[in-house]
Image: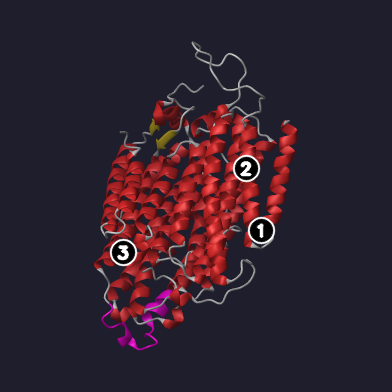
Amino acid sequence: MDALLAGLIGLLFAAALYQMLSGHFLRFLLGLVLISNAATMTVFVSGRLTIGAAPLIPVGADAPVTEVANALPQALVLTAIVIGLGLFAFTLFLAIRTFRRLGHLNANTPLPQSPAKNGSLK
Amino acid sequence: MSPVLWPLVIPFVGAILCFMTRHTGIDRWISVAAALAHTVVSILLVVEVADGSILAVQLGDWPAPFGISMVADGLGAAMTLITGITGLAVAVYSISDVGQRAAFSGFHSLFQMLLAGVTGAFLTGDLFNLYVWFEVMLISSFGLLVLNKGRDTLRGAMPYVALNLISTIFFLTAVGLLYGLTGSLNMAHLRVTLDGLEPSMTLSWVTLLLLLAFGIKSAVFPLFFWLPAAYHTPAFSVSAIFAGLLTKVGVYALIRTFTTIMPLEPLFADILLWCALLTMFVGVIGAAAQQEVRQILSFHIVSQIGYMVLGLALNSRLALIGAMFYLIHHIIVKANLFLVAGVIHRVTGGSQLKSIGGLYAAQPILAILFLIPAFSLAGFPPLSGFWAKYVLIQASMELSDWIAAGTALLVGLLTIYSMTKIWGEAFWKPHPAGDDALHGKGIAWSAWVPIGTLAALTVIIGLFPSPFYAFAEMSAQSLLDPSGYIEAVLGGSAP
């Protein structure tokens, strides 16, 4: 199970990097989704995997008596997913606005400079 | 409430209040008040840790290493104070720099949120928590960056957003691997656990991922391209706070990780050393080729980052003292130069060196206030930059690293070239449209006050370096020997 997931994480990283290096911002976004998932999976698998063992403590006991799932990575993963969603939403919005403004999303197309307009924020 | 938590709570409260009052116009004053309060509580925090004691708070009363610890040691407290001072200066500057529309879009609450994120990163004692603060910082900086809706901003925002996201994902992956290796995320507990572990392949990968993640954040060669692409496009208040604080959080994370948590392996220290030297050199050469004030300054950020990373890479006591001195000096000077760039833009109507001039005749006091941080950046005695460079070069010579010492000296000289270029073009030569073009362009008090204060701080650090040096020495000591840190967090009963 661990080896399978490790392979999957590797695959996700590879696919994500391939997408991100393509030079197109939309593909970069797709890569971003994949690589966030790969990273969260890494955190999740690092906490060691158990099957069907809820992290519950029996009534009256101070600690779990049998082997239970590690609850901490789940909390970490949840945090990372929420943050990742927020950042992705922002980046998507940025892509839309950039496309409307520049007419393309290709990172390798140079842009004529117009620095005179910089710095004013009214 | 513990003094460690005040500098965190205040900017959060400030952000909420600023957001609620963003249509009234008093939000800028709330922002100034919050930044002032932040500075005051940070001063108290620095006073508390000045004798070498380390304050730790366990959030939610969960004992370490199970809960999240917030820790203030010398380095953390000093960085918090410098965040407060820079935040206050920029908050005052933004009174006249940021218009009503940007304020309504949430400039002041985003600004306070950014300060909260930066402060949190400096005070946390937990690696995953550091990741969360990075994200708080990142999302606020994204918001601030795109408040200005120009084409160049969007163009610069893409690499900025992309590379910073990749950096945080590398960081998260490293955190995951490290947790899998040690079962802990608490920095003090990580150190204890890692000390008992044999070096392994996984640990090397973790080191590499962390170096990459923080290297992108701090704009180290060859990962710095996002910085000069983005920093010259937003409002001047925004680029001043970015220039002062954001990359330095990356440097702080490098120092914290590779001293407190895991000392740097010799191989990685060598890699970091060469990266640092190339960062210094490439940054300063890049600056020489630029013709726009903020682009010149942006490349200089990269160059100066090299000095701080050099201090970490040399990894001796004196080098760490130098790195810390450099951090503090640099934040003040760099933020100030960007604020001056804003005033230059306002008075002369531009930032391209070709199209401006005549400032020395029109604003001689501004000329002096530019020269102080500019010469300090280049390392002229008796300004703060001289001592910072002096300690670092001394540390390189102590280790017989002549290449590092030589590069540091050479880059200092080349820095003067760029600074004299700005001086000659913006201040000395007449304005292309005739010097009358500058008539009646006054400078608001809200620009004079922060620029003057930061310049005064530069001079004070330069003239009286010994208390700052002693503080840096104390902090470097606790970085090299984290037993005090571990005891403060884990309470002496390290499991």
Question: What is the x, y in percent for residue B403?
Answer: 58, 57
Q: Which residue sits at x=46%, y=47%? A: B136
Whether B147 is among the magenta residues is no
Q: What chain letter is assigned to the residue under label 1?
A: A
Crowding near pointer 2: few (<14 within 10 Å), some, many (20+)? many
- Amino acid type of the residue that numbered disc 2 sits on in the rendered structure: Ala
Question: What is the x, y in percent for residue B388?
Answer: 43, 55
Dot 1 falls on a residue whose secondary structure is helix
Q: Are the residues flagged by discs 3 and 1 in contact, CB closer than 8 Å?
A: no
Question: What is the x, y in percent for residue B320?
Answer: 48, 46
In the rendered view, tell whether residue B278 sits above or below residue B366.
above
Front residue of this view, candidates B186 and A40:
A40
- Residue B398: tell me if it is visible: no
The residue wearing badge 3 is B451
Q: What chain letter is assigned to the residue under label 3?
A: B
Please tell me the numbered disc located at residue A39.
2
Dot 3 falls on a residue whose secondary structure is helix
Q: Within the image, what quadrant is residue A56 found in? A: top right
Which residue, as the protein is rendered here, is positioned at the far top? A60
Closer to the camera: disc 3 or disc 1?
1
The residue wearing badge 1 is A27
The stretch in magenta equals: B421-441
Q: Which residue sits at x=44%, y=39%? A: B124
The CA distance from mark 2 to mark 1 is: 18 Å
Quarter containing the N terminus of chain A: top right
